[in-house]
Image (cartoon, grey):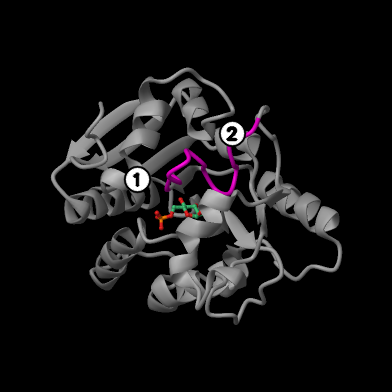
Amino acid sequence: MRVYIVDDYEQMSVKAALIVAGQITMKADSILGLCTGSTPIGMYKELVKLHQQGLDFSHVITFNLDEYWGLSPDNVQSYHYFMHENFFKHVNVKPENIHIPNGLAENVDDECIRYEEAIKQANGLDLQVLGIGRNGHIGFNEPSTVFIAETHLVELDADTINDNARFFPSREEVPTRAITMGIKTIMQAKKILLLANGEGKAHAIKEAVTGEINPGVPASILQLHPDCTFIIDKAAAKYL
Ligand code: GLP
């Protein structure tokens, strides 16, 4: 695991975008795993700037980590909407190459199997970008007693619902369930890039980087990944 500590959010975003751009430069048809949340917004902005300078996404295939269960793609709080607003509508990823779990699928088990299969059919993820929850979650893999393997439906922790309530008109409107790639799906990515900023993430980062590998801190399993890079700002590195 490589840990880069940078001064601030802007440096984190620029460095992350350069790594993603490097991946696309190396392999034009890269399979990118993408994440949502406030953390990667700066990285997406930088990628849009790089696209305006010539970075080509036309062969790139994307798979998002997760989606709220019960939200339609045009709901402004859905991760579909987030991705289109913050990234896809500004770059040239082909619509047919964009994959995000369907939060309204008729049968959730079938949707999880379909999503996992689509990633396998694409030969797996070349680079997965992650944020981290304050409780150490990645994607929506919440602290647990076991590492849940593949794409699945998850009940969100009260902490996660509280944290994400800032994006919703009220806490009551935050969905309580989500579809997420599992830990195995994430760990099978060839490269992983985790971003974190702010003191609120400092404890989770300490546990993920220096703590015991245990499903109580889902991100701790990243210590076992052969090509994992953390880019964190000074505040998130406070306890390292
Ligand atoms: C959500 C997402 C995660 C993300 C986390 C942190 O729970 N499912 O993928 O990493 O929020 O979000 P933020 O970047 O807003 O702190």
Say above or below: 138 vs 214: below
Q: Is mark 2 on a helix, strand or loop?
A: loop
What residue is pinned by disc 2? 188
Residue 57 belongs to the span the image colors magenta: no
Disc 1 marks a residue whose amino acid type is: Leu
The single residue placed furthest to the left in the displayed view is 7
In the rendered image, the quadrant that contains the N terminus is top left
Quarter placement of the C terminus: top left
Q: How crowded is mark 2: few (under 14 residues within 10 Å), some or many (20 or more)?
A: some
Residue 175 placed where, x, y %?
64, 65
Q: Residue at x 34, y 63 (%)?
A: 41
Q: Position of residue 66 (x, y in %)?
A: 60, 56
Q: Locate residue 160, reporting x and y percent.
A: 53, 52
Residue situated furthest top in the rendering: 212
Image point (69%, 35%), residue name: 148
Q: Which residue is drawn at 50% across and 58% down?
A: 162
Name the residue at 26% across, 48% down.
198
Residue 209 percent coordinates (x, y): 37, 25
Residue 120: name its quadrant.
Answer: top right
Secondary-structure class at tag 1: strand
Amino acid on which disc 2 is placed: Gln
> Mark 1: few, some, or many residues within 10 Å (few <14, many ≥20)?
many
Query: Does the numbered disc 1 mark a residue whose Cβ is under 8 Å from ligand 1?
Result: yes
Circles 2, 1 touching at the beta carbon (< 8 Å): no
Identify the residue position indicated by label 1 in the image: 195
Pick whichever of labels 2 and 1 is earlier in the sequence.
2
Left or right? Give the position of 82 relative to 71.
Answer: left
Q: Does the magenta stretch include residue 140?
A: yes
Q: What stretch is highlighted in magenta?
A: 131-144
As drawn, 145 above or below 116: above
- 44 or 82: nearer the viewer: 82
Q: Can residue 212 be seen here?
A: yes
